[in-house]
Image: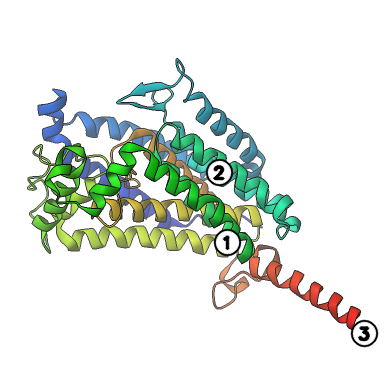
């Protein structure tokens, strides 16, 4: 397939989100930087600008690397991120702070592992596409790897990132065309595991209690205060907000407002209208990513595009749902907007890969009216139908 120009709408949306994130980090972190950290008001935004520049350079480099090269390096990168997840749990190697062990120096391996698992799943489901309907040989091995990495992230502990890794991986599992009954088996495997980790770990159990009783005074000092302040900030924003930099939640009411709960600051300062525009940008980005996947001939590239789009979409939904009290607090950053160096660089690198894939899509006249590629090798539905026809033909011959 001849290379053409990348999807500039994806590039525009990503740059817009990053620029908006820098603006909101500055607005949300000024007081925190001065009063809590003892640094100048621009402390956090300057650090995030550095990460944004690194992410931009990486995105532009990856944007010019072809899918075949990405596929060749996919397995290697997956192995590297797996070893990083293991290494971060080893005392003396992984850095421990605030009771969690999540860093190797300045790097948070779980953020890179989100991309690494997508590489692995896209590669393995492309390589073993003929075994897709064999649960033991075609579906179980990648599921075991997905579950193993999920458990490694939980041991840090980081339930939110682990859930994002698991759900992003499941996007590829579904897009690959795994049979429905096998998906049920997957649910039986993973759902009890998730419930067990959520219920039997004390701090996660408390988060569930806070979710069920967000205004309980008995839970204020156990995590309830943060969600209470978040909901009050959202209520205070109203339809059009209080104005940029005019919100009161960053004035030490909302703990660490520039990180996971920055969406509450956005709603307070820009209102429901501003939040709607932001969510529309995320929706457009996910839609364009899915469209790229639909127009790719290469099965590996197509699955990877779906996985990256799912990672951004699921991450956004989880963050917004947690901040607005619809689900228990998870600790997942808002993609491209929340403060966090590794998360920003990793997401921008993923966008660079998606932009690279967008340069190898089919032309519009090679795509059916509903947006589905003509090539059968990227159609999971075609792969599902074929075994059914074969089984039916065999039964028909037996009857005769």
Q: Confirm whether residue 359 shows in the render.
A: no
Q: Is residue 317 visible?
A: yes
Say which element carries label 2.
helix
Q: Is residue 383 above or below residue 165?
A: below
Count of labels in the image: 3
Vertical side of 26 occupied by 134: above or below: below
Dot 1: few (<14), some (14–19), or many (≥20) neighbours within 10 Å?
Answer: few
Q: Residue at x 63, y 60 (%)?
A: 182
**Rendered position, 112 above or below 19:** above
Quadrant the C terminus occupies: bottom right
Q: Is residue 125 left or right of residue 14?
A: right
Residue 172: where, in percent of width, then height?
Answer: 56, 55
Question: Which residue is more in the foreground, 277 or 360?
Answer: 277
Residue 368 at x, y percent in the picture: 59, 76
Q: Residues within 10 Å of mark 2 (few under 14, many from 20)?
A: some
Marks 2 and 3, the one that precedes in the sequence: 2
Question: Residue beneath label 1, please?
Answer: 184
Q: Nearer the viewer, residue 123 or 193?
A: 193
Residue on which disc 3 sits: 400
Residue beneath the point at 18% across and 63% down: 273
| Residue at 76% across, 58% down | 130
Tell me where residue 217 sits by quadrant. Answer: top left
- Foreground residue among 156 and 23: 156
Between marks 1 and 2 in the image, the one whose residue lies nearer the viewer: 1
Identify the mark nearer the N-term, 1 or 3: 1
Mark sitting on residue 260: none
Q: Residue at x 56, y 33 (%)?
A: 82
Vertical arrangement, residue 202 with respect to residue 353, above or below: above
- Residue that carries the numbered disc 2 in the rendered image: 147
Q: Secondary structure at mark 1?
A: helix
Q: For the residues marked 1 and 3, what is the alpha-carbon distance in whole angstroms?
A: 35 Å
């Amino acid at each position: 397939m001849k290379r053409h120009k990348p999807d500039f709408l994806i590039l525009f949306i990503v740059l817009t989100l990053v620029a908006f994130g820098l603006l909101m980090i500055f607005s949300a972190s000024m007081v925190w930087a001065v009063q809590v950290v003892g640094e100048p008001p621009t402390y956090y935004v300057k650090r995030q600008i550095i990460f944004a520049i690194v992410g931009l350079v990486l995105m532009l480099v990856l944007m010019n690397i072809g899918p075949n090269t990405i596929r060749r390096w996919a397995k290697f990168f997956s192995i590297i991120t797996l070893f990083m997840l293991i290494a971060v749990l080893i005392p003396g190697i992984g850095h421990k702070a605030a009771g969690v062990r999540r860093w190797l120096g300045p790097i948070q391996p779980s953020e890179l592992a989100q991309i690494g698992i997508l590489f692995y799943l896209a590669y393995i489901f492309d390589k073993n596409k003929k075994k897709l309907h064999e649960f033991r040989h075609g579906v179980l091995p990648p599921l075991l790897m997905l579950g193993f990495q999920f458990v490694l992230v939980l041991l840090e502990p980081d339930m939110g990132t682990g859930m994002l890794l698991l759900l992003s991986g499941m996007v590829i599992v579904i897009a690959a065309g795994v049979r429905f009954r096998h998906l049920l088996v997957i649910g039986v495997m993973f759902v009890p595991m998730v419930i067990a980790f959520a219920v039997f770990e004390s701090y996660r159990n408390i988060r569930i209690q806070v979710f069920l009783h967000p205004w309980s005074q008995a839970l204020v000092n156990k995590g309830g205060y943060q969600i209470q302040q978040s909901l009050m900030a959202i209520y205070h924003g109203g339809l059009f907000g209080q104005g940029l930099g005019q919100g009161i939640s960053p004035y030490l009411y909302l703990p660490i407002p520039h990180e996971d709960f920055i969406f509450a600051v956005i709603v307070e300062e820009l209102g429901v209208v501003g939040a709607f525009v932001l969510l529309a940008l995320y929706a457009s980005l996910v839609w364009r990513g899915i469209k790229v996947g639909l127009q790719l001939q290469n099965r590996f590239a197509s699955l990877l595009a779906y996985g990256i789009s799912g990672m951004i979409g699921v991450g956004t939904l989880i963050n917004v749902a947690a901040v607005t009290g619809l689900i228990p607090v998870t600790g997942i950053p808002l993609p491209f907007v929340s403060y966090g160096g590794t998360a920003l660089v990793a997401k921008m690198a993923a966008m660079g890969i998606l932009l690279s894939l967008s340069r190898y899509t089919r032309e519009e006249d090679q795509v059916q009216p509903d947006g589905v590629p003509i090539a059968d090798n990227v159609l999971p539905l075609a792969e599902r139908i074929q075994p059914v026809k074969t089984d039916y033909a065999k039964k028909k011959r037996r009857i005769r």
